[in-house]
Image (tube, rainbow, N blue to C red):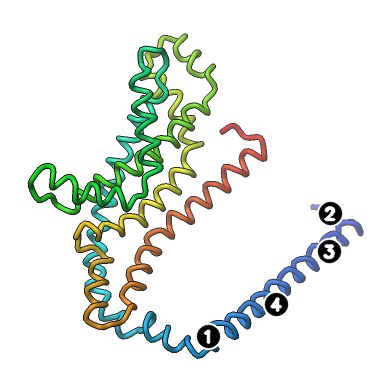
Amino acid sequence: MTTSTPSALELERRAFRRSRERRSVLIAVASTLAFAAVVWLTVINTEGWATVQQSFFDPEIAVQALPEVWRGFLINLRVLAFSIFTVGAASLLIALLRTLRGPVFFPLRFLAAAYTDLFRGLPFIIVLYLVGFGLPTILGTRIDPVALGVLAITLTYSAYVAEVVRAGIESVHPSQRLAARALGLSYAQTLRRVVLPQALRKMTPPLMNDFISMQKDVGLISILAAFDAIAEAKGVVATTYNFTPYVVAGVLFVLLALPTIRLTDWYTARLRAREQTGSIL
């Protein structure tokens, strides 16, 4: 069995790579220490930091508030779970309406475009007010805040997601549709078996970003008198005169979003690597 001996040039290259790696590690350590020193001097080592720490980062009040905030956070999770399905169904319908061909479908395309323009431009908090206080007044009855929250999120985010879906559908080359129709597939079969599977790969990263934004905005349903995480935190703040419960609620929302954020970054990097290597998407 023969073993190959690296050449002098290869040994030189390996030594150069090791030196660059050591240099990168040293620079990273130095920059981290410098950043920590700046934070210490400008934030922590100041007169007001003790007051901020006591008002926002009190461990005792955080432990006290956690059960109530968690109970409210479960309501946010319920709204999010329902909204995933309603936003997905509504956005797909709107996107399909916007991609219909032919002059006979102009009214449907116009209504779908007007819907997306309206709810993409309207601030979400105003949609909450209109839905939460206007709809019960029109119907003359009390409506569950969870249902109102799902409706408000669906109205707003279906407009955003519909544009992502439409862009993904239109990114598929028209020859794919023509080939499918030439093989005898119907319009619905062409969408389901040819267009949407290809469009999904392009749509996934922006859809994940919209999902992260939706995870945050479910925290605003406290405006509708829902006893969610923010409302429960507000109740504890009113009794303790300390803002730490808000931080506890914020940490729960961050923990909810982190897996999706990391998954989005991983999938985006994977798509970029496949594109750069010339793989078929």
Give the class, few, some or many, for how many residues have Cα within 10 Å of label 3's Cα (few <14, many ≥20): few
Q: Is residue 179 left or right of residue 38?
A: left
Q: Which residue is mark 1?
A: 44
Q: Marks 4 and 3: in contact by CB < 8 Å? A: no
Depth check: give the residue in front, 175 or 134: 134
- Residue type beneath disc 4: Ala
Task: Report how far apart the C-alphas of labels 3 and 4 lie in the structure.
Answer: 21 Å
Single out the mark in the foreground, 4 or 2.
4
The answer to which of marks 3 and 4 sits earlier in the sequence is 3
Question: What label does residue 28 carry, if any?
Answer: none
The residue under the point 82% across, 61% down is 14
**Dot 1 amino acid type:** Ile
Closer to the N terminus: mark 1 or mark 3? 3
Check the image and report above or below for 201 versus 249: above
Contact between marks 1 and 3 (CB within 8 A): the answer is no
Q: Earlier in the sequence, mark 4 or mark 1?
A: 4
Q: Considering the numbered disc 2 on the image, is that residue within a helix, a strand or a loop?
A: loop
Per the image, label 1 sits on a secondary structure element best described as helix
User: Can you say whether 58 is above or below 277 in the image?
Assistant: below
How far apart are the alpha carbons under marks 1 and 3?
A: 40 Å
Determine the secondary structure under disc 3. helix
Residue at 47%, 52% (x, y): give it: 263
Q: What x and y, as percent, mark residue 144?
A: 14, 52
Label 3 vs label 2, nearer the camera: 3
Q: Which mark is residue 16?
A: 3
Secondary structure beneath disc 4? helix
